[in-house]
Every structure is written in structure tokens, then in C-alpha cells.
Amino acid sequence: MDNSNYLYLNTSILYRCGQKYYDKKLSGHDINAAQILFLILIYEQEGLNMQQLAQKGCFDKGTITKSISRLEELGYVTTQSSPQDKRIRLLYTTDKTKDIIRDIYMIRQQWWELLSKDIGAQELQQFEATLSRLSENARRYEQQEEAGIKLFGIQKLTLLDYPQKMASTIFTGGCNFRCPFCQNSDLVFLPENMPELQEEDVLSFLEKRKGILDGVCISGGEPLLNPELAGFLKKIKDMGYAVKLDTNGSSPDQLKYLVEEGLVNYVAMDIKNAPQKYSETAGIRNLDLSGIQESITYLKEGHVAYEFRTTIVKELHTAQDIQDMADWLQGAAAWYLQNFEDSDRVIQKGLHAWDEETLQQFQKLAKAKVPNTELRGI
């Protein structure tokens, strides 16, 4: 017998067949297999909150939110604010649930009888013990600490980086672009002696600033290159902070994941230049713009609050480039033209800023297609 897919295949069979069974049996109540476990857990522990529900079954936030919303719509579940923390919603079943809970338990019991048919009591007892151990091992893996994210800087207080919020900015290291005007060359090239911050120290700082700071900005480098970013953001979100992400938009799948998991509240995506000059401005030959385009489209669909921003450099940006970018970004919620600032940390020396009058002309061109275009850094 080939055991290479034993656990995965048999777990899938049990899940799929059980789903079909519950969907059929519950159809008269307008609920399905995706919602029944949540309903039972809430009924058996009234006043549960979503975080506790997530911990019980290792559920992700999106799955819980979708199912609870549906149960609320159907009148089976209601929510109330916690007296201790108004941001936390407590879950309760309604009389409508109590009217059908016996039927649900009977449906569950019948499914177990079907599964355990012709299996002896001792064999079932051994199976239950083994399954419990397998589940506990899986839960332990789910809950074990992920490798800490590598962090290389923190600005403890900023009133500029996160619109309308008092925030702290945290810098990740490494980038897949080499923009000539980048102010953070050390975060791009990561010198051997680059000091690293410990994740636990950064989290400890944020814990102490709760009630003082409103948000946290994640910048770089390119933050989305870090596979540990989601776990880090979960810890920040659990403290109650809003999160702003700075990105070059080259990793649309990672961007979508963070947004759809509720780990990001605001996205600032850099638009380097018009498409025909993107490679030159990003410092990468033959750059594939498909990921950039996908991120632009996704943000413009309104899944999360966002802004586009472009650092304007005299040697890299002309009026025609501004016009071409405006055509590309037409209909965007917000676009900021940021004046270049020289420093000893810039990747390429000898670049210059445009004068204020020229920037205002660029702004006027941009506003024709993106009305909410503003200037920064003048």
C-alpha cells in the first residue's frame, strides 16, 4: 500500500464527504457545513469572542468573519461589545439557534454512527486517542513561534509617514529594486556590519507605546520580500495598532494576502516612473511590469485605503513622464509627487530636485487625470 498520501488523502475524503452530508441535512435551516461548527462552539460557550474562536480551531480571520457574518444575517448569532473593551465583539446564539440545536446535535450524531459503523469500541478509542495526538501536534506547529523578521531600523515617532496618525516607522532590509534616488542604500545593500534590531525588542517598545501611538509604518527596503512579515504584522495588529505598508508593488500576491487577512490598513505604493522608463528608474534591466500593474489594479479596486507616490528627480522625470503616469493611474484615489532630497545615503550621486514652479506644473498635469494629486517635500 502506498502511504505517501495517506493522511492528506483520507483527511480530504472525510472532510469532503462530511461537507456534503452536512450541507444536505442542514439545507432546511439555510446553514451549511462551513457554519455548523462555529454555531456549536458559540452555543456551548456563549460570549466567546472571535480571537478565542480562532484559537479553538486554528481558524483564519477571513473564514471566521465570513461565517459569523452569514450566521448574523440568518438570525442565528448576535454580537455585543465587550464591557471591558468596546473593540472586542462577543458572540451569542439567538432563540432561533436554540430552537434547532437539538436537530444539529442529532445530525452530528448520525454522521458519527455512519463513520464508525462496524468498528469496535477499542479500535475507536485508539483512533480517537491517535487523532487527538495528531491534532495536538498540528496545533503545536501552528502556534510555535515563527522565525523572527529581520529589522534594521526604527523611527520611534513620526507625524508624517502615516496620514492623520501618530506613528512609528519600522524598516526591513533588502530590496529587489536599485532606484538611483533611494535614500536608504544601506537597507538595499545590507552591509555586513549593518546593525540588526531584535523583533522582541521592537514589539516590547510598541507594547509600551500603546495608547500613545496610533499606527505603525512598515517600510524598507521592500517589506514584501520578507516571508515572516505576516506573522510580525499579526503581533502588531493584536496590540491594536493600525498598519501602513510601504511597497514598490512588485509582489502583488503577498500584497493581496496581507490586505485580505486584515493585516494592513493603508498602503503606500511607489510609482517609479512612466512604464517606458520604469526599468531605468528602478535600476533593474528589462523589468517585468506585470506585477506592478497587478498591484495598481488591485489597489484601485478599493480593497484597502491607499496612495500612490512618486519621487520626482530632475534627471529622471519630465513633463511627458508625468503625463504618461497620470494616464496610467487615471482614477486613483490619491497620488503624491515627492520632491527628491539629496543625502550621503543616496544610491547614485549627482541627482537633483526640480524647482517648486516646475513641480507645480507637474501637479497641474497630473490633476487632469488624478484630481487628488498633491505635492510633498517642497
Image: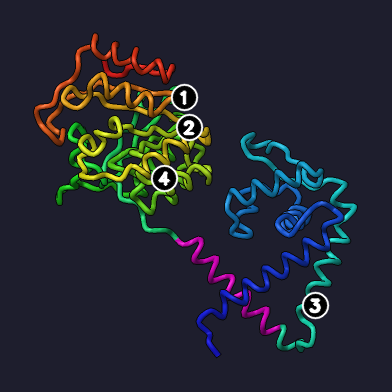
| Front label number (2 vs 3) | 2
Please report contact status of discs 3 and 4: CB closer than 8 Å, yes or no: no
Q: Earlier in the sequence, mark 4 or mark 1?
A: 4
Q: Amino acid at mark 1?
A: Gly
Residue pointed to by mark 2: 300
Q: Residue tagged by mark 4?
A: 252
Q: Quadrant of the C terminus?
A: top left
User: Can you identify the residue that label 3 sits on?
Assistant: 114
Along the horizontal axis of the image, is 214 left or right of 276?
right
Report the side of 261 relative to 91 (left or right).
left
Q: Earlier in the sequence, mark 2 or mark 4?
A: 4
Per the image, the residue denoted by label 1 is 331
Label 4, label 1: how far apart the Cα atoms are: 20 Å
Question: Bounds of the magenta span?
Answer: 125-144
> Is residue 135 covered in magenta?
yes
Total marks drawn? 4
| Residue at screen point 63% across, 59% down | 56
Task: Tell me where residue 286 appears, x and y as whole percent.
Answer: 23, 45
Q: Which amino acid type corresponds to the residue marked 4 in the rendered image?
A: Pro
Q: Position of residue 5 (x, y in %)?
A: 53, 79
Of residues 357 and 212, the one drawn nearer to the viewer in this rendering: 357
Q: Amino acid at mark 2?
A: Lys
Label 2 vs label 4: CA separation?
A: 13 Å
